[in-house]
Amino acid sequence: MADVTCLIEGHVATITLSNPDRYNAMSLLMWTKLGDALEALRSDSNVRVVVLRGDGDRAFVSGADISEFDTQRNTGAGVATYEAAVARAQGALEQFPRPVIAAISGICYGGGLGLALACDMRYAAPSAKFRMPAARLGLGYTLAGVHRMVAILGTARTAELFYTARVCDANTAAQIGLVNELQDDVFSHAAKVAAEIAANAPMTVAAGKLALNTLLEGVDDAGAAAVDAAVKACFASEDYAEGRKAFAEKRAPAFKGR
C-alpha cells in the first residue's frame, strides 16, 4: 500500500516514501501526504534535520505512479490538481527552514529526481541510478523543476539529462555533482550526517539555509533583509554565548536553538 511515514528520533525526522510494489512510485495521495508531513515538521522546532528516503533499497522513488495517469492526469482539471500536489511537496522540501538530506538507494527517476534535487544534500548507494524520463513519456516539465536542476547541475548537464532521457549511474552522478558522495550503507551515512548537523547551532544552520535558498532564487531587497535579520538573531542568541563558553572550556556545546 502506498504511504508516507515519518519517524522522529531526537532532533532528526526521517520521512520514508513507501510504494514498494511499484518501486516507490509517487501516487497522488503520497504527494499530498508528503506535503502534509513537511508542513507538520516545519512547525516542530525540535526537528533540526530531515532525512528523506525510499522504502527498502531497490528504489528511492521511481517517479510518478503512471498507473494513475488515466484517472488522475487525463483532463485539464486532473493535471492541474496533480501538478499542484507535486509543486506543494517539492516546494515544501526546497523551502523547509532546516536542512534536508536525501538518502538514495536504487532507482531515482523522474519525480524522484525532482525530490532529490529539492533536498539540500544527496547521498547515494553505488547501485543508485538516475533518470529524467519526461521526454520518453511526452510529459511537460515545469519551469520551477528545470530551474532547480540548472541551479544545481548547470545548463549543459541539465540539457543532457533532460533531452536524452538516458540513465545516469551513481559514479557519473557523483562526478557531475548530482550527489555529494557515494556510500555503501547510504542510510547509516545519512543518519550520521544528520546527527552531526543536529548537534550544531540550529539558528546558525537555519540562517545558512536561508542564505543558500536566497542565492538560488535570486537576491532581492526582501531576501537580503531576511538573511541579515537571521544573522543578527544568531549573534543575539543564547546559543552564541554557549558556543563561545564551550570553546573556552574545551567541551562540546549544548545548543538549545534560542
Image: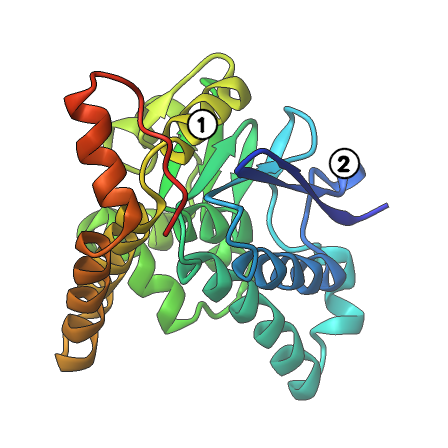
* Quarter residue 64 falls in: bottom right
Q: Mark 2 points at which residue?
A: 20
Q: In this view, does 100 lie above or below 93?
A: above
> What residue is at 24 percent from the left and 51 percent from the top?
208
How busy is the neighbourhood of tag 1: few (under 14 within 10 Å), some, or many (20 plus)? some
182 left or right of 36? left
The disc placed on residue 195 is 1
Query: Which image quarter holds the N terminus?
Result: top right
Instruction: Give percent across and percent down for residue 224.
Output: 14, 71
> Is residue 95 depicted above or below 245 in this figure?
below
For the point 52% across and 18% down, the residue is 188
In the depicted view, which residue is nearer to us: 94 or 73? 94
Q: What is the three-letter code of the residue carrying label 2?
A: Pro
Which numbered dot is residue 82?
none
Judge whether residue 90 can be spotted in this image. Answer: yes
Quarter holding residue 17:
top right
